């Protein structure tokens, strides 16, 4: 059933086989066995695509509920134990996930070796329930009312540029001046593209900026900013070192954009022992490692 859900999400037998470390034939045989047991065809297969049948879509909803019930049963058992067990599927953005979250999860696994962690880095919005994630570590952004959010660390974004860029193009004196500058907006997760919503002396203000260059990856935007291609907006955890060293200069320092680091998870996992341990550990870890934000 778990393999069935994975194939349904990815629409690919080969992708699931690769991610699970098994052969494509193994995945295909397991799906065929499930189809035989249920006496129904779950997927329409062609040489290029794998798509759920109408019956497959209906069964997927039931299978997901069964797997959730099994997870809940495991959590009930784990609550009676002192050691949490089970798999946590975690999503996060590329830059924060690689540079900040991964070291924290490494320490979590050393402390709780009976846990398993699958970390996926995605620079796009994540459908927690639809994609089967237990936890999404987000930097800023909004979340659906059906999800629970726990702040792990306070964070904000600042406007930056290289000294060379400012020497050549001039220093903006007010937020409206950004419209006349070369800017590097980012298409990152659920942030509106090309609109920077800032908090400043006059409260919340929004400015529309033109894109000299753009990317969906924050690390690339950071690199382009260091090379003098324009003004960009990044979290202090990302650019703090460059601001201190002088490689970057903060532009319009009276403005910022709040972007706290939060753990987002579905209500159905609110009683999960492994999730509770993970979130609490991350809160404590970031509190002790303030230089990591």
Image (cartoon, rainbow, N blue to C red):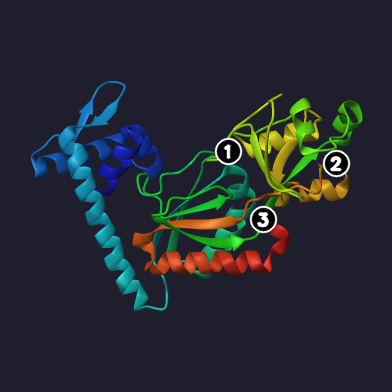
Q: Earlier in the sequence, mark 2 or mark 1?
A: 1
Q: Is residue 182 in view from this perspective?
A: no
Check the image and report above or below for 274 versus 256: below
Say if mark 2 contacts mark 3, CB within 8 Å.
no
Left or right of 177, for residue 269: left
> Which part of the image, by quadrant, shows the C terminus?
bottom right
User: What residue is rendered at 81% in x and 46% in y?
Assistant: 242
- Image x and y of residue 158, in percent: 74, 46
Question: Distance from label 2 to label 1 (Cα)?
Answer: 23 Å
Q: Earlier in the sequence, mark 1 or mark 3?
A: 3
Question: Distance from label 1 to label 3 (Cα)?
Answer: 16 Å
Q: Residue furthest right?
A: 167
Say if mark 1 contacts mark 3, CB within 8 Å.
no
Q: Residues within 10 Å of mark 1 (few under 14, many from 20)?
A: some
User: What residue is rendered at 48% in x and 41% in y?
Assistant: 125
SS of the residue under disc 1: loop
Q: Which mark is residue 155?
A: 3
The residue that disc 2 covers is 247
Q: Earlier in the sequence, mark 2 or mark 3?
A: 3
């Amino acid at each position: 059933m778990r393999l069935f859900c994975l194939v349904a999400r990815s629409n690919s037998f080969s992708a699931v086989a690769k991610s699970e470390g098994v052969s494509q034939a193994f995945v295909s045989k397991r799906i065929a066995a499930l189809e035989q047991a249920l006496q129904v065809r779950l997927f329409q297969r062609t040489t290029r695509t794998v798509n759920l049948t109408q019956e497959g879509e209906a069964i997927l909803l039931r299978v997901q509920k069964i797997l959730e019930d099994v997870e809940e049963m495991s959590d009930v058992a784990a609550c009676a134990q002192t050691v949490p067990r089970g798999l946590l599927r975690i999503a996060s953005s590329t830059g924060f996930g690689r540079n900040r979250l991964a070291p924290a999860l490494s320490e979590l696994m050393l402390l709780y070796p009976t846990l398993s962690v699958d970390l996926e880095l995605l620079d796009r919005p994540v459908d927690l329930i639809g994609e089967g994630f237990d936890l999404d570590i987000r930097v800023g952004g909004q979340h659906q009312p059906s999800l629970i959010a726990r702040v792990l660390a306070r964070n904000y974004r600042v406007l930056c540029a290289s000294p060379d860029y400012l020497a050549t193009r001039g220093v903006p004196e007010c937020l409206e001046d950004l419209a006349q500058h070369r800017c590097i907006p980012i298409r990152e997760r659920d942030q509106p593209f090309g609109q920077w919503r800032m908090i400043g002396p006059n409260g919340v203000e929004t400015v529309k900026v033109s894109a000299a260059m753009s990317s969906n990856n924050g690390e690339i935007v950071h690199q382009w900013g260091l090379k003098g291609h324009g003004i960009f907006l990044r979290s202090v955890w990302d650019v703090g070192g460059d601001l201190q060293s002088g490689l970057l200069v903060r532009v319009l320092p009276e403005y910022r954009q709040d972007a706290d680091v939060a753990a987002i998870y579905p209500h159905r996992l609110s009683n999960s022992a492994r999730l509770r341990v993970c979130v609490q550990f991350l809160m404590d870890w970031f509190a002790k490692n303030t230089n990591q934000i």
